Amino acid sequence: MLGSRYVLKKIGWAVLTILFVIVLNFFLFRILPGDPARSGVRDPRLTAQAVEAIRVRFGLDKPIINCFQSLNPVEVGDCFVNPMDTQFFIYARNLLQGELGISYHSNRPVADLLLERLWNTVLLVGMGQILSIIIGIVIGVIAAWKVRTSVDYGALIGGLVAWSLPTFWLGIILLMMGSRHFDLPIGGKITPGATYANAWEQVLDVGRHMILPTLTFTIVFVGEYLLIMRSTMVDVLSEDYVLTAKAKGLNNYQILRNHALRNSMLPMVTIIALNLGFTVAGAIQIEAVFSWPGLGQTIFEAVNRRDYPVLQGAFLIIAVAVVFANLIADLLYSYLDPRVRAA
Amino acid sequence: MTASTEITSIRGLSRTFSRSTMGMIGLILLLAAILMAVFAPQLAPYDPYAPVKVTIDDIYAPPSAQHLLGTDDAAKDVLSNFMYGSRVSLVVGFFAAFIAVAIGGTIGIVAGFWGGKMETGLMRFTDIMLVIPDLPLAIVIVAMTKPSLWNIIFIIGILGWTGTARLVRSQTLTVKERKFVTRARAVGAGNSYIVRRHILPLVLPLMVANTVLVISLAILSESTLAFLGLSDPTLVSWGQMLNYAFTRGAMSAGAWWALVPPGLGIVWVVLGCTLLGRGLEEVLNPRLETHHLAVGKRMIARSGVRGTAVADVETEEWQVL
């Protein structure tokens, strides 16, 4: 059983972090240079009236928050306006209703735009994470078991090189080789214009498109996981209970599986949780390279179009997802290791 | 950190460090990259910033005697761009890491040394910043401000300090409880004196090792931002070379020479920093690199050659110093 006080505390911190992200997200976009209305519609032929109309349309004529008309440049305003009529609280209220604003580029609600792509990212990241965790654990355990042999050194060097690879570059290289020599698709999620006789054919097509992005993701993340697993495993295997198990006459496989692996899993859970931010970074790069229609590609396109509402919304969704995943990891950790709850 | 972190001076650190093969390889890789960056104007066959006359055949020209690594989308020499490109990576890496470690180190020492409400507040803030994904935030900020070299350095720096803060805090906590600190306090030394004379020297070697690892992360961040189109347009960098090559048809032109070298450059520098950082960490925090299931009798023989036994002797020596 989880201690309910521990759970409440963790949930409280997650909520606080999300509130911080929301406030940061709002004020960052108001303090940094560039009037959103002007940068969104950069056409110099626009008249002053047209710009004003756009400002009213996006609610930018309202004060930022009580006492401040604008923050860049800083303009002190009326402190006694109705808080619900300021940009900050309108933004907060819209968020509660699941609205993230309107894309400057496509004029569609940002929330719809991002949600339809979120699942593609989850599919890619989920697949890559599962593969890299499994492969990382297996190689890490073998390297630790054969410590200070050529197998171990090979795994160590391989892990360090994989860790040092820029994700996007590995993607480019694999894309070049895969499309040239293995006839794999060069990008996207499905073959354009394809019609499928049945659902199975569609799954196969998506699967073919997923091979290279997933492979890139797996190679980059396997490096870190195997290095962590290896060093944890070496530590665990030098514990006295391993010697006891050996003295009892258990074979190596039994010791590894029943005694060592269990105890090495805790640090892995922490690393996987801490890694979620990097996972997102990896997904952005991979999606940009392989035109995978996920959140990352949306960000890549929004950067080039300076589509700020989309960037802002994407950052918010990603941050909330990472905070939430971290919360789950924390709770999982305390379930796996009851000592954490006491601390 | 356990009590094995006993290297109290940068001199002691470098002496033990010379025994780490991995660390030495990393140091050589990094030094070679720095030399190339410094002497880029002398080494590079062409000046990447000089205007060139272009004909259609010069674009993505394959490697030849004039252009050893071919040319890129603007008919510039890839080898020269590659050499000049190392400058941006290294400058961003070093300065951003310096900012990150300065912020993280200050927060870590203040939190660890003063404790109390200050510590709780600072570490909660660190935890919140640790969870927020860096790259999307960096993308948002760089996209909204001008992607100039110093902006990018500053943004990578102020987003990359969380790991250092936690590391330095835990090290400060262990150092704070040591006898010589208590003694210094007993004879009436002030807080700032203790931090300067006793805490900082013991935390510094660890911070140096950490800085090297932060440099590698900063270089990866810089090249990623550049690849996504957020780089200083007036400077050639590896990430930017890849951005241009990728978005301007090097792939369909089959121009591997425009795509492979910049990436190898990043791997070179990042791997150098990673090996160097891990080598330094290995020296600072030696671990028993063997265990009960290790093959044969090597366990006893090997741990004596390298690892704890050696480090313990060194430890004694430094404690006397």
Image: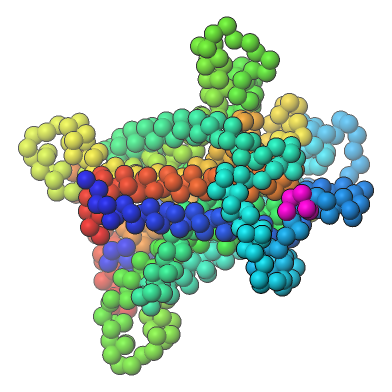
Q: Residue at x 46, y 62 (%)?
A: B126
Instruction: Tell me: A111 left or right of A122.
Output: right
In the depicted structure, whether residue B14 falls above or below residue B235: below
- Marks counted in the figure total 0
Q: At x 30% / y 35%, what residue is drawn?
A: A142
Location of residue A327 in the rendering, given as x and y in whole percent from the top left corner: 39, 48
As for residue A57 lying within the magenta part, the answer is yes
* Quarter of the image that includes the N terminus of chain A: top left
Residue B295 visible in the shown view = no
Residue B248 counted in the magenta span: no
Q: How is the image coloured?
A: rainbow
Q: Residue furthest top?
A: A197
Magenta-highlighted residues: A55-59
Q: Judge by depth and name the residue closer to the eye, B268 or B248.
A: B248
Q: Main secondary structure of the magenta part?
A: helix
Q: Which residue is drawn at the image coordinates 67% and 67% (left, top)?
A: A81
- Which residue is drawn at the image coordinates 57% and 62% (left, top)? B158
Residue that extends furthest to the left in the rendered view of this protein: A248
Residue B112 x/y as whole percent? 38, 72
Q: Is residue A41 visible?
A: yes
Instruction: Examine the rendered structure and indicate whether residue A250 appears above or below residue B96.
Output: above
Q: Position of residue A216 (x, y in %)?
A: 53, 32
Q: Position of residue B255 (x, y in %)?
A: 73, 30
